[in-house]
Image: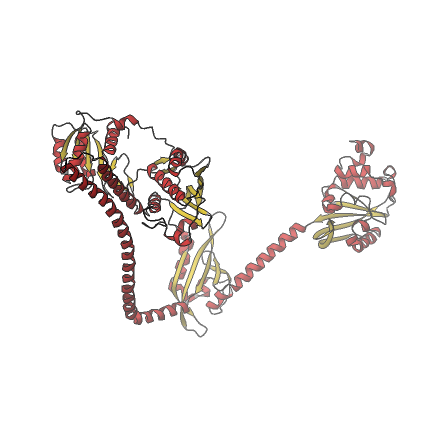
Amino acid sequence: MQQSKDYPFLSGGGEAASIIAGFGWASTPLGPIEGWPGGLKTTIALILRSPVPIVTLWGTDGIMIYNDAYSAIAGGRHPALFGSKVREGWPEVADFKDNIMAIGLAGGTLAYRDLPLTLYRNGGKPERVWLNLDYSPLLGDDGTPVGVMAIVVEITDRIRVERALDAEREGLKRMFDQAPGFIAMVEGPDHRFTMANPAYRTLSGGRLLVGLTVAEALPEVVEQGFIGLLDEVRDTGEPHVGERTPINLLQEDGTLEKRYLDFVYQPIRADDGTITATFIQGHDVTEQHQTEVALQALNNTLEQRVIAEVYARSKVEEQLRQIHKMEAVGQLTGGIAHDFNNMLAVISGALNLLKRKRARGETDFDRFIDAALEGAQRAATLTQRLLAFSRQQPLAPEPLVVNRLVASMSELLTRTLGEHINIETVLAAGLWQVRADPAQLENAVLNLAVNARDAMPEGGRLTIETQNAFVDEAFAAEFALASGQYVLLAVTDSGSGMTPEVIARAFDPFFTTKGVGRGTGLGLSQVYGFVRQSGGHVKIQSGIGVGTTVRIYLPRHHGESEVPAAKPLAAAARQGNNSEVILVVEDDSRVRTLSVESLRELGYTVIEAGSPRAALAVVDGPETVTLLFTDVVMPEMSGRELADLAQVKRPGLKVLYTTGYTRNAIVHNGMLDPGTSLLAKPFSIEELARKVRQLLDGAV
C-alpha cells in the first residue's frame, strides 16, 4: 500500500491508516504528517494495530486520531472526527471532555465503569449509551504530557440485557409473591424447602419453612401420606395431581384444621435428566368445597321437584317437536303425493286409452306408450332425487379430475342452456383429485346450471370455476366437516339473486320459487344430499340483483391418479345370444316376469327363480349360468349372500344386482362395495341391455 511506503508507521492500520495518510494535517496544530515527532508516530502505530477502541486527543485542543475499532463508537460522525477538536467533535459532552483534557495534560489518569451518557452520533438523534472509559496522559519526547489516550469500550448491549434480566427477575418475584395460589420448591431426598411464597406461608400458619425439610416444618403431614407422595414423584419422575384433597394443618392454638387443596407436585429435572427438586403449586379450595357440599345438600332436597318440572317440560317440548316433525313430513309427503299422482295419472290414463283403442281394433298406440314410459321415467327420477336428498342413494365413487368432467360437459351445457347464456369456465391449474360418483357430480353441475339459467330469463353469464381450498377448524365445526384440503367447484350466475329467507330454505325438498309446472323443488336438495353423502358441503352466497354463487366442497383424494378406460360403445347395443344363460332371481312375480321377458327379448336364454334357495338349486344343477341377475332385498337371504354362495360353487360367475332401495347389503357408508354392479329399479330395457352387455364383455 502507498501509505506503508510513504509512512511506515501506518502499515497495517486499516481504514483509519488510509484516512490519516490522506488527511490535511498541516491545517491542524499537529502540522504536516512528515514533521510528526517519533513519540506521536509510535503512539499512532500502537493504537492502529489494537483491536480495542482507542482515540488519542493531542494538544490542549484534543485533536482526535483513532483506530478502526473506535469508528463503531463514532457512529455517523466517522470519519469527520479525524483531526477535529474533541470539544467540537462531541459537543454534547464538551464539559466532560474539558475536564478529561485538564486532568490528562496535568499527568493524571481517570477510569469510569458503566458510565451512562447521551450521545448524538447518528443523525442528531439522542441515544443513551453506557461506556467503560480509561484515560491516561500521552508523554512527549521530553516526558511532559502532550495529549490524552482514551480506551473506550461500549457496554450498552450488556447493560440493556442485564437490566432486562433484572426486570424479569423482579417481575417473577412480584408474580411469585402476589400469586393467589400457594407455591413452594423443595429439594433433595429429604424435601428441604428452598422457597415458599406468602400464600404458602399463610396456609401453613405463618411458620418458618425455607431451610427446613417438609417433615421438620410441617410434622403433622407426615402421617397423612404427603411425604410418600413427594417420594413417589421424585422416584418415578411423574407429576402428581391432587383434587379436593383433604389435609389437617396445625394452627397457632395447637388445633388441627381440615382444609381441601387442589395441587400439583411437578418434578424438576437437571440438564442430565436427574430429578433435583419438586415444584409445588396449588389452591386452597376449602370454601369452594364447602359451598359445593351445601349446594349438593340443597340439590338433594330440590331434586324431586326439579325432576317433576323437567318431566312436564320435556312432554311439552316433545309435543312441539312432534308438531314440527309432522309439519315437515306433511310438506314432504304433500310434494311427493302431488308429483306422483300427476305421474300415475299419465301412466294409468295412457294405459286405459291404450286398452280401449285396442278393443276397438285401433293401432295408433305409440303416443300413449311414450306418455306412459315418460311418466314412469319421471317417477323413477323423482325417487332417485328423494334418495339423493336423504343421502340414501348408492354411489359408485371413483378418483375424478373435476376439470376434465367440467370440460367434457361444455357441449351438453351449451345445448341445455341455450345461446342466450354465455358460459365461462375458470379451471385452476394443478387441481387436486376428488373421489366421487362422476354421474352424480355431472348431474349436480347440470342442476345448478339449469337453476342459473332460470334466474336469467333475459340471458346472462354463467361461470364455472374450480380451485384448491383449505377448510379450517372453525368452518369445519360450523358445517360438521373434517378440516383439511378440499376441491372447490363454484357455479356463479348474473341473475336475479335470492333473499336470505330463500337461501335458508333453498335445500328443502319441494321448495321452489318457480312458477307452477316449472320445477319440482328437488334440484338443490338432490345436489345437497349427494355432496353431503360424498363427505363435502354446499354453500350458497347470493344477493338480490347481484346474482348467485353455489360452492361445492369435495374432500381431496390422495390416491394415485386413475383415468377410467373408455367403455366400448358397441357392447351396449349388441344383442345377446342363446348360449349366454342368465339366472334371474326376484321374489316379486310381476317384476320377475318383466325382467325375464325383457332378457329373452334381448336374445338371452333365461332361467328364473322366485327365491334365493330356488336359485341355489339351479346353481347346484347341471345348467350353465353365465350371469346371475338378482334382487338385493329378499326373504331367506339377501342378494349379496346369494351371490357369495353362488360364486363359491361357481367361481368367476358374474353378478348384476337390482334393487329399488338398499342400505347394507351392497352399500356401505352410502358407497357401492368395490367391484359391485347395480341396476337401480325401475329400469328401461335399453338400460338393462347396456348393463348386461358391459358385464358380460368385461367393460365394467
Q: How is the image coloured?
A: secondary structure
Identify the image quadrant of the N terminus: top right
Residue 69 picture location, percent across and down: 72, 43
Viewer-proximal residue, 424 or 270? Answer: 424
Q: Is residue 693 above or below residue 501?
A: above
Location of the C terminus by quadrant is top left
Q: Indicate whether 407 appears above or below 204.
A: above
Image position, residue 233 (x, y; %): 41, 55
- Nearer to us in this view, 25 or 468: 468
Q: Is residue 536 visible?
A: yes
Residue 149 drawn at (x, y percent): 79, 47
Q: In terms of depth relative to the viewer, which is nearer, 531 or 575?
A: 575
Q: Is residue 141 left or right of residue 438?
A: right
Q: Identify the residue at the far bottom of this view.
A: 253
Q: Please identify the quarter of the rendering in which residue 404 is found.
A: top left
- Residue in the picture at 41% in, 62% down: 262
Image position of 449 with respect to 280: above or below: above
Q: Please state the horizontal and vertical placement of residue 189, each as a whole percent of the image.
A: 45, 56
Q: Left or right: 141 with respect to 606?
A: right
* Residue 392 appears in view: no
